[in-house]
Image: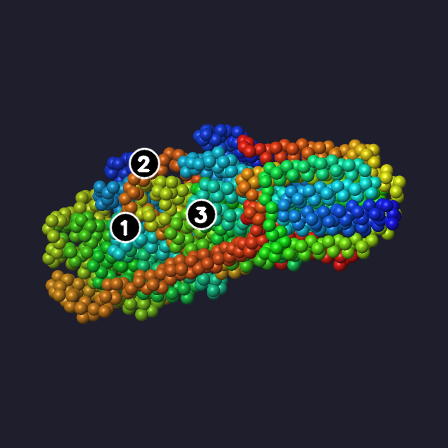
């Protein structure tokens, strides 16, 4: 057990997070962007579980449980929004969606 | 080199590589499939960390439910392949990669130089106990009862929300 | 009766309210006229009864104060609404109500068939109300109430025919001018009041005057008070430099000119100076200023009067000139002589104006004397009364004007200087000339009007007041018969008023020693001058009319200067009115207000707006851009953490 | 001082507040019911304020009808109301003008009657609240709350440029009041360093304010003063006023001129002077100079206006200059004059705005050049306009004279200003007042009828006469027998002057009062 240092898990988590960021920033397809967000959530989850396990405390895993709940809710609503937008704009390319603009 | 370490390297390599592949595939369906692979490997990592419950939930909820939903939407919208994901036309993309790399380097730097490993003395028995369904269930129904209820409510709300949003006409 | 003196004020007010509120419903001119006149008439009777009651009282008990209620009180200030009846105010009250009553009666005829008959009488009554407050007020503030009140009535009455044209503008412009110029005077009067309050800690006449009597002459304070009050007087009584409104005031109906702009209101300044005689007497320098201003006004107005062709304009300048005489009297310390002239002037000038009104009435609003001539046979009553008035104002021996004017001139000589007297005589000479020029051009010579006009004598309601005033103009002087003639009794009028002016006269030490011989000599000179110039006028305007036009051509520049009233109006317009108006509009409003102040405010707002517009560019609307910015932020935050690690 | 709680003032606040809420339950179609209800509620408030007036004891110098209820106990803020002789006059003015303005807008307000009435009543709550607050926090709340209905009144029912005007009005005032808020908090904290508790209770702060170190006191005074000066508005903070007045509907203008501006001067009397007496006396000459500039400047600019409403608006600048001058002269005469002048201005200018509004309703123009010769067409209106103008220009016997006379007289003998020059310049405003009002009157009412459409004008109707008569009665009343009103405030003004002048830190010796 001692063999795997906690840093390895954390660096993996950080790497996945960074990849997720890259995805969010470079991908144009809204659904893929969503998936990247899921990836980032998972990287956070990984860190949580890692700490939970190394500390021997279940709280971290409970948190992961909640994160998953939120992720599920978020993806459900988010995908619904994407469908609604697609219906209006006939695209899910976020470069063409700038209704936030002033 | 213990078995655990080999397993760790195996799963973490899959996770890292699948993540990179996922964001570079032009076809969103391919992205989704690599994301599922990533989730599976993370579930494996959870097992190594003695988090059995979370590991199973990861497979059921994420890989099973959420990703299926994603694929379903992808099919529904018939999303086209994305071209020029990393071509230099849009300078912001290069900056994005640079920034992401920078953030990763920073976090990694922080992780190694704060070296949390020295402060933590893992207790295998405790960690095994922490990951059991019993323990998590106990926590959920005692200390985290209110958030648990709230989470349920959140799911209900999102169900209704998704329904309302996705419906074609509502008045 | 003295305790009921407030009736003299109240009755015209009631008349005003009745005519003002119900007048347009009454419609019957007779009823309106009777209400208007009778209220003033009864006021006159009340004043007369009070006067006789005062006569029966010993001299030191003749002063009465009738308190009504407390008006203004704040801090140390306590102004009561109270009326002061003494020898001075009762004389003025009699003049105002008496002459006022006659003019009211006259107006019934003059204003006949005017569409706003009721309004006219309402205003006239309001005027009498305000004037009575001015005269009877027991303190400066009640006086000021009347002071401004008469100004308002003057405004309303000058602009009575508000839709008519007057000279270059409209009657309402003339009215506004009168009010505003009066306000400039009031400004001085207000400051005078404040300074009095500061110095004497009271605004009550008796308190102020008794304190003033005790206070030593401390130089500047008295000077300033007197100066401020005198500025007030110049406004109301049309003295240089504020006389410009009075000629324009002729835009009003003629009875108004008679009542307000000849007999009563314009003498308010004289009354006020007389009332405050002790204060003025304590400021000798200002007394000199008053005398000089008065004389200059008299002189310049007379020169202008020489060439005017509008009958009312001639009379207006004559009024200004006569008011100048009164101020000359005040300035040399002959207060009772001044008031005496106020009285006689009220008689003959009211008569002149009413006579002029009668002529204008007959000539269907033609006011240019060049279009009159030969009216003697058409309007005999007007003619005779007019002659009497003209003789009176010219100082024909035995008539009222003779006594009062010579009293003033004599005092100017005795207590002033020969120069004052000489200019005074010169003015008197011109007065006689232009009055008779007017008379001869109007009643004698060829008829220079179209005969469609059919001039006719005015109805009795107009001529009876003329006759009464003519009688008064003749006999009015005898109550002020100078001591030279009356012997033992001395000057009755002067001795009646002497309790009022005694303290001021003591302070001035006016009674020097000049022999009766001198007085008679001077009188003879002025009589000769008057008769001479009457003859001159007769010669020029009936025998050799061409002399007039020749002279005017010969001295055409001077003639134009006089005809245009020394261009005073134009100078004021160019130096005060225009710069104020243009400056306010162009600089204060358009630049200071809109550009500088509002510019700063709007500038601050638009600076924020511009900044915001700049920052707004970051809001591209692309989520990925926002995410990118967020990541940059995270990276920076992480750097900060690393550095502080 | 009545120590027991007296709820009359609270009722006075509650009547329009509950009334306005009640209005919300009326169907908006029933416009006449809404109008009557709004009018009735405002009238009820007026009647209650009359009751308060009758039970008011002018012989006392302290606050009466005090009602104190703890509100936010953590920062020691309480709902604390009470009135003295100065505030009761302004309350009477407020409750008097509100029903009149509501009544006057029966015809001119045609859209959104319900909302209009609602906002007017809400405005009344705010105005009364400002005049009764004895707690700075509460005062601030009312002060700000009152902005909102006014903002909407200008912004919804205003003229063409209403949005610009309402935003300008709002931001101008907001700018000032934020400065004041900072000072209020600072004062509370400073008080805490003595008593141990944060407080915004005015009566406590009266004891503490004068002791604030001089340099800070200057800042505090200025921040309070600028806030009030904007409201007054004192030159050079006045430019919001013409815009707001011109764009506001008649009722808004009347309330704005009649009451809102008085809140500035009231604030100066109630807060600036007693809280910071030392700075007040120090700044008195500067402020008086500004006031005098305002008097002359306002009058001159009013003179050249082409729009009647703007003319009246600028005349307000001039009139309020008198009030400020009177306040800072700090003699009984002058401050009394200022107090009465506040009421006067509310009546005279209110009447002028009402009249301009009445003729605007008929012709839909306010340009002076579009009128002329209406005297013979609508004589009653012309008379009313004359009367209001005369009152505004301070003709003796009408109300304006009383105020101006006392102010000028008081400032002349003021030991604080100590120079005639102030009064001499200020008094020249009397001349200009005559000029701009009479000139306007001459161009509008006299002369020949220039425009054919003026011939069809209708004279004042009964409703409009009924609106004007009460105002005119008060104009005459104050002009002839001002004692009724002066007596009310005499004690209170003396108290304020004592607070300023009998202060160890002020070096001006008190003149004998």
Measuring from the top left, give residue C534's x and y in whole percent.
18, 62
Q: Are the residues under badges 2 and 1 in a single subunit?
A: yes
Name the foreground residue: C536 vs D407: D407
Q: Are the residues under badges 3 and 1 in a single subunit?
A: no
Q: Secondary structure at mark 3?
A: loop
Q: How many angstroms separate mark 3 from mark 2 (CA)?
A: 44 Å
Name the foreground residue: B15 vs D248: B15
Contact, CB < 8 Å: mark 3 with mark 2? Answer: no
Q: Which residue is mark 3?
A: D161
Contact, CB < 8 Å: mark 2 with mark 1? Answer: no
**Above or below — where is D235 with respect to B34?**
below
| Residue C22 disc label | 2
Residue for point 33% across, 50% down: D369
| Residue C252 disc label | 1
Q: Chain of mark 1?
A: C
Residue D122 image-quadrant placement: top right
Please identify the quadrant where the N terminus of chain C is shown: top left
**Above or below — where is B36 with respect to D327?**
above
């Amino acid at each position: 057990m001692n063999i795997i240092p906690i840093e390895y898990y954390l660096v993996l988590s950080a790497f996945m997070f960074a990849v997720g960021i890259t995805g969010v920033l470079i991908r144009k397809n809204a659904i893929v962007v969503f998936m990247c967000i899921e990836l980032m959530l998972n990287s956070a989850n990984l860190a949580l579980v890692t700490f939970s396990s190394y500390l021997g405390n279940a709280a971290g895993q409970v948190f992961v449980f909640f994160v998953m709940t939120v992720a599920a809710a978020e993806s459900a609503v988010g995908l619904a929004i994407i469908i609604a937008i697609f219906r209006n704009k006939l695209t899910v390319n976020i470069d063409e969606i700038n209704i936030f603009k002033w | 080199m213990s078995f655990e370490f080999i397993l760790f390297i195996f799963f973490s390599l899959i996770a890292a590589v699948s993540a990179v592949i996922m964001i570079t595939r032009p076809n969103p369906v391919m992205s989704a499939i690599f994301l599922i692979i990533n989730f599976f490997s993370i579930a494996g990592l959870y097992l190594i960390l003695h988090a059995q419950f979370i590991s199973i939930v990861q497979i059921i909820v994420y890989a099973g439910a959420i990703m299926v939903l994603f694929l379903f939407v992808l099919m529904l919208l018939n999303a086209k392949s994305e071209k020029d994901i990393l071509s230099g036309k849009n300078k912001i993309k290069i900056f994005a990669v640079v920034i992401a790399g920078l953030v990763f380097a920073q976090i990694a730097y922080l992780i190694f130089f704060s070296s949390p490993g020295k402060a933590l003395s893992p207790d295998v028995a405790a960690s095994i106990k922490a990951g059991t369904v019993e323990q998590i269930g106990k926590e959920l129904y005692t200390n985290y009862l209110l958030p648990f209820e709230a989470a349920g409510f959140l799911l209900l709300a999102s169900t209704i929300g998704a329904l309302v949003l996705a419906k074609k006409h509502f008045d | 009766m003295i305790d009921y003196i407030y009736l003299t004020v109240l009755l015209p007010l009631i008349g005003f309210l009745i005519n003002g509120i119900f007048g347009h419903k009454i419609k019957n001119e007779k009823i309106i006229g009777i209400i208007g006149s009778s209220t003033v008439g009864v006021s006159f009777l009340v004043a007369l009864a009070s006067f006789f009651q005062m006569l029966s009282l010993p001299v030191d008990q003749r002063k009465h104060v009738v308190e009504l209620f407390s008006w203004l009180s704040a801090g140390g200030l306590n102004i009561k609404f109270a009326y002061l009846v003494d020898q001075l105010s009762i004389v003025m009250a009699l003049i105002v109500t008496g002459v006022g009553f006659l003019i009211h009666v006259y107006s019934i005829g003059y204003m006949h068939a005017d569409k706003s008959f009721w309004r006219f009488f309402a205003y006239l009554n309001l005027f009498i109300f305000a004037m009575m407050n001015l005269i009877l007020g027991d303190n400066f503030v009640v006086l000021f109430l009347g002071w401004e009140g008469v100004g308002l009535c003057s405004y309303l009455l000058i602009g009575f025919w508000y839709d008519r044209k007057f000279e270059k503008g409209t009657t309402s412009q003339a009215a506004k001018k009168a009010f505003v110029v009066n306000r400039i005077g009031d400004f001085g009067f207000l400051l005078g009041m404040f300074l009095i309050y500061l110095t004497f800690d009271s605004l009550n006449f008796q308190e102020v005057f008794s304190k003033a009597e005790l206070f030593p002459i401390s130089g500047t304070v008295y000077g300033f008070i007197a100066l401020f009050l005198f500025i007030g007087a110049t406004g109301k009584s049309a003295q240089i430099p504020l006389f410009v409104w009075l000629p324009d005031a002729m835009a009003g109906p003629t009875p108004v000119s008679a009542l307000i702009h000849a007999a009563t209101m314009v003498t308010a300044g004289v009354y006020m100076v007389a009332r405050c005689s002790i204060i003025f007497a304590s400021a000798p320098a200002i007394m000199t200023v008053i005398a000089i201003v008065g004389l200059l006004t008299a002189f310049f107005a007379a020169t202008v009067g020489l060439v005017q062709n509008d009958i009312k304009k001639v009379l207006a300048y004559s009024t200004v000139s006569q008011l100048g005489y009164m101020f000359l009297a005040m300035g040399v310390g002959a207060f009772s002589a001044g008031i005496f002239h106020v009285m006689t002037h009220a008689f003959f000038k009211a008569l002149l104006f009413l006579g002029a009104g009668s002529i204008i009435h007959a000539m269907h609003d033609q006011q240019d004397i060049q279009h009159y001539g030969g009216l003697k046979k058409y309007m005999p009553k007007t003619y005779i009364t007019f002659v009497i008035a003209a003789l009176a104002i010219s100082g024909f021996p035995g008539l009222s004007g003779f006594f009062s004017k010579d009293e003033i001139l004599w005092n100017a000589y005795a207590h002033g200087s020969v120069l004052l007297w000489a200019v005074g005589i010169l003015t008197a000479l011109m007065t006689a000339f232009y009055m008779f020029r007017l008379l001869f051009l109007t009643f004698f010579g060829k008829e220079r009007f179209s005969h469609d006009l059919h001039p006719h004598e005015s109805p009795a309601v107009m001529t009876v007041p003329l006759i009464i005033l003519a009688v008064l103009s003749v006999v009015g002087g005898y109550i002020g018969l100078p001591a030279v003639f009356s012997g033992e009794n001395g000057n009755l009028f002067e001795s009646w008023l002497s309790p009022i002016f005694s303290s001021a006269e003591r302070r001035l030490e006016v009674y020097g020693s000049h022999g009766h011989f001198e007085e008679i000599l001077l009188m003879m000179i002025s009589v000769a001058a008057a008769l001479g110039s009457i003859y001159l006028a007769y010669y020029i305007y009936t025998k050799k009319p061409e002399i007039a036009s020749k002279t005017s051509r010969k001295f055409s520049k001077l003639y134009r200067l006089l005809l245009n009233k020394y261009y005073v109006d134009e100078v004021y317009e160019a130096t005060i009115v225009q710069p104020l108006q243009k400056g306010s509009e162009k600089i204060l409003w358009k630049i200071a207000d809109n550009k500088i102040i509002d510019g700063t405010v709007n500038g601050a707002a638009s600076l924020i707006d511009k900044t915001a517009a700049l920052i707004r560019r970051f809001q591209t609307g692309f989520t990925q851009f926002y995410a990118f910015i967020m990541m940059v932020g995270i990276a920076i935050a992480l750097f900060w953490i690393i550095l502080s690690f | 001082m009545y120590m027991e709680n007296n709820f009359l003032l609270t009722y006075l606040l509650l009547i329009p507040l509950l009334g306005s809420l009640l209005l919300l339950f009326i169907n908006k179609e029933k416009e006449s019911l809404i109008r009557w209800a709004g009018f009735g509620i405002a009238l009820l408030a007026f009647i209650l304020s009359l009751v308060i007036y009758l039970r008011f004891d002018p012989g006392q110098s302290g606050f009466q009808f005090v009602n104190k209820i703890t509100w936010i106990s953590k920062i020691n803020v309480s709902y604390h109301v009470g009135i003295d002789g100065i505030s009761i006059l302004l309350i009477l003015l407020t409750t008097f003008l509100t029903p009149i303005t509501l009544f006057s807008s029966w015809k001119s307000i045609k859209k959104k009657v319900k909302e209009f009435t609602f906002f007017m009543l809400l405005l009344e709550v705010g105005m009364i609240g400002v005049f009764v607050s004895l707690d700075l926090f509460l005062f601030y709340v009312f002060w700000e709350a009152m902005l909102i209905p006014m903002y909407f009144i200008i912004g919804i029912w205003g003229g063409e440029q209403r949005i610009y005007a309402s935003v300008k009005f709002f931001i101008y005032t907001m700018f000032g009041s934020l400065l004041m808020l900072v000072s209020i908090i600072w004062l509370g904290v400073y008080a805490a360093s003595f008593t141990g508790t944060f407080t915004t209770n005015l009566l406590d702060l009266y004891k503490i304010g004068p002791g604030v170190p001089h340099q800070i006191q200057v800042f505090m005074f200025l921040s309070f003063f600028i806030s009030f000066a904007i409201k007054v508005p004192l030159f050079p903070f006045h430019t919001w006023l013409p815009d707001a007045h011109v764009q506001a509907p008649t009722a808004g203008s009347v309330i704005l001129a009649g009451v809102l501006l008085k809140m500035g001067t009231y604030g100066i009397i109630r807060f600036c002077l007693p809280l910071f007496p030392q700075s007040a006396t120090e700044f008195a000459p500067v402020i008086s100079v500004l006031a005098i500039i305002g008097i002359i400047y306002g009058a001159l600019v009013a003179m050249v206006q082409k729009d009647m409403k703007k003319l009246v608006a600028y005349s307000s600048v001039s009139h309020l200059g008198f009030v400020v001058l009177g306040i800072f002269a700090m003699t009984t005469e002058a401050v009394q004059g200022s107090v009465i002048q506040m009421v006067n201005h509310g009546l005279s200018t209110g009447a002028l705005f009402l009249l301009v509004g009445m003729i605007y309703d008929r012709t839909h123009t306010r340009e002076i050049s579009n009128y002329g010769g209406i005297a013979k067409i609508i004589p009653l209106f012309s008379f009313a306009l004359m009367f209001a103008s005369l009152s505004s220009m301070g003709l003796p016997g009408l109300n304006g004279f009383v105020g101006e006379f006392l102010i000028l007289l008081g400032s002349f003998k003021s030991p604080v200003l100590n120079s005639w020059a102030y009064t001499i310049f200020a008094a020249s405003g009397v001349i200009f007042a005559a000029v701009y009002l009479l000139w306007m009157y001459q161009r509008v009412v006299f002369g020949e009828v220039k425009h054919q459409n003026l011939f069809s004008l209708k004279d004042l109707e009964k409703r409009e006469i009924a609106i004007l008569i009460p105002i005119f009665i008060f104009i005459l009343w104050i002009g002839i027998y001002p004692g009724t009103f002066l007596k009310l405030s005499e004690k209170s003004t003396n108290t304020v002057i004592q607070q300023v002048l009998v202060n160890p830190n002020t070096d001006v010796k008190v003149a004998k009062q």
